[in-house]
Amino acid sequence: MTEKGSGGDQGWNMSARFRGALKREVPRWLDSGILPPESARALEVRYRLGELESEGGRLLAAFIFGIGGLLLGGGVLAFVAAHWATLGAAFKVVLIFSGLLGFHAAGFYLWHFRNWPRLGHALVLTGCLVYGAAIGLMAQVFNVHSEWQRGFGGWAVGALAVAWAVGSSWAGLLALGVGLVWFNGELFDYGTLWWAFPFLVAGLIVPLAFRCRSKALHFFSMVALVEAFAAIAGKEGESSPSVLMGWAAGGFLVWTWGEFTESRTPCPALAGSARVAGVVALALGAYAWSFHWLWSDWALHSGRAVGNSAEWLISVGLPLLAGIGLVAAAWLAPAADKSARRTGWVVVAACVLLLLSVVSAPGMASPYRSYDYYGGGAFSPEVALPVVLANLAAFLLAGAAVLSGLSGERRGRFWAGSLFAVLLVLSRFLEYETSLLLKSMAFLACGVLVIWGGTLFERRLRRREVAHV
Amino acid sequence: MSRRTTLILFSLAVGLQAVIVALVPAGKYLALSRGRPLVLKLAPVDPYSMMSGYYAALNYEVSSPSAFKPSQNPQPGDTVYAVVRKGEDGAWHPETLLLHKPSGLSPEQAFLRGTFRPNRWGGQGIVYGIESFYIPEEDREDLNRALARRWEAQRLPPPPAVGPPAPPAPPPPSPPSYAEVKVDGSGRAALVALRVGDKRFP
């Protein structure tokens, strides 16, 4: 792994689009005398400009070999399936093991002994898919009927072992996907090991993402963690506010992990995927629960408000405590960008408001509740406080994105925050009974504000670009 | 990491995959090789969900908690031990449902380990891991017909719409259906064959 701040790391960090533009510009700057030859060489080394073409070729080759590997695996499986019923059990077992070992052996040989890494990788990945099929086929051959999720659990373990052995982020993604199926099966189908899933993701899949430097694997690990905490919190609580509690705690943990990754780990480039996953999860949660009918409908049903203490500890207590520890450790490091801290405090405030909205929901303080005197979907005064708090949290998150876009001159964040704020305003106007005139004024005001704010932001960016030149 | 180290790690990982695949039928193989043979009576299933692809969904007399004498009160997800007793028909019928492994059983008694959980028909049931049976293509139609005949025969006639209640009609003769299983010392069951009337599958 390259050290933080080294030239190689910077080259890996930047997008291919930026490096492509730089590669086109450097010869022009050389010709016009803006750039001395030694600086041009330094730029080439720092941003790995010489590797751009081969990287593009490798990506295409990976895609073609990946599709080819899947087709090959599918063809073999279809051929075997067509003759499956006529084969004896022993021959079936031989076929299953031959397929499993054959794909892996061919893949590894081509990858490491014949210098065909992309094709080899695709075959190893196909071997992991064949492995999943092998578990199901063995159960079929021997009439084994078991808890369905156990097959997915075994598949995840084997795929993860291969992912770690060869450093394959694709096999890691497969393990994460089938592991998520196993987790949900365990959680909702009377399994007992569901509690292990968040720890396995944090302890085995996130480090794999760091080893492979895979933003995709890192991002989806974060998404899986948020889903897991929300599902665990909602399992016994039988209520939407319980789900929001786990969801908010998971979003907070994932976002703080992004803060920690940037300042305290050798892979700051992975921080973005965690922060995006965390803030998007929080924003989705705040937006969904900003509608009053969700809270009012919940108030209609009596039942258990909260789950048992172990479930709350795993889904809410641990992520909140770990998140506080991570953000404290991250923010104790000297900050290069003070404005990022200000944005961070806004995100923290939004998390607190979201959690307070759940705590203030009617009946959440007692383990059992019975509210059955409101009409379906009608606004109940008792849910006013959680609705207001969820809306405030959503607006704060929109503000955090706009603030981050303004201070960091990040166009994507600015526009995402602005559009989210507009979506919130329009949703409220459509949700509550207001006159058509008021609705039209709200739409007009939103449109004018977006155009005005956007114009100001784009002008500011342009002035900065001119000043830089 | 050197190529040699990667090769060793990869071999271990693929070996782990092979072991997991081999473990899928291992429990059943152990039960088949060392287990005690029992015959369990099949219970009716909904004929429309009976055949699911290449599998027959099986329901047993011992799958229903109400077939046992009331004893302990299991919760969904609990491991339960179903004590069965050999009947005069040669089949083993439900006796007691326990939450702990039974001991001191007579030779006329045996036990199966299962999980108490909602069954696929919506009620509470006990799952023993022998609830699906892979049907070879050549036997599929035969078994389907035999099971359907069996369950149709077990249906009660509808009550008359008007008039005095008719005396209960004797049930039509129907061939008995059984599953031959083997059960190991821990109560794990493995399915050996199905007997529907005078036919045996496979």
Image: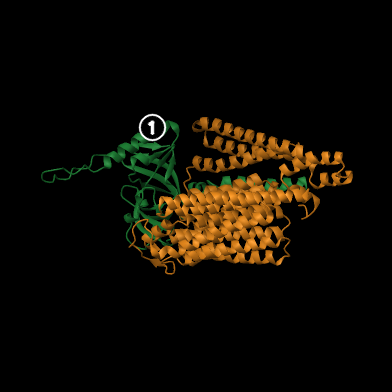
Chain colours: A orange, B green
- Is residue A192 visible to us here? no
The percent coordinates of residue A440 (x first, y second) are 46, 49
Q: Percent from the top left, x then y, of residue A124?
A: 66, 40
A363 vs A32: above or below: below
View extreme (bottom): residue: A366
Q: Residues within 10 Å of mark 1 (few under 14, many from 20)?
A: few
Q: Look at the picture and state if A6 lies above or below A368.
A: above
| Residue appearing at x 43%, y 41% in the figure | B133
Q: What residue type is labelled 1?
A: Glu
Left or right of B75, for residue A178: right
Q: In the depicted view, which residue is nearer to us: A434 or B175?
A: A434
Q: How many marks?
A: 1
Q: Residue B138, position in %: x, y? A: 43, 31
Q: Mark 1 points at which residue?
A: B141
View extreme (left): residue: B163
- Of the pair A144 and A223, the residue shown nearer to us: A223
Name the subunit of mark 1: B
Q: Residue at x 44, y 66 (%)?
A: A364
Which quarter of the figure has residue B168?
Answer: top left
- Please tell me which residue lies in front, A306 or A149: A306
Figure check: B49 above or below A316? above
In this orientation, which residue lies closer to the viewer: A436 or A400?
Answer: A436
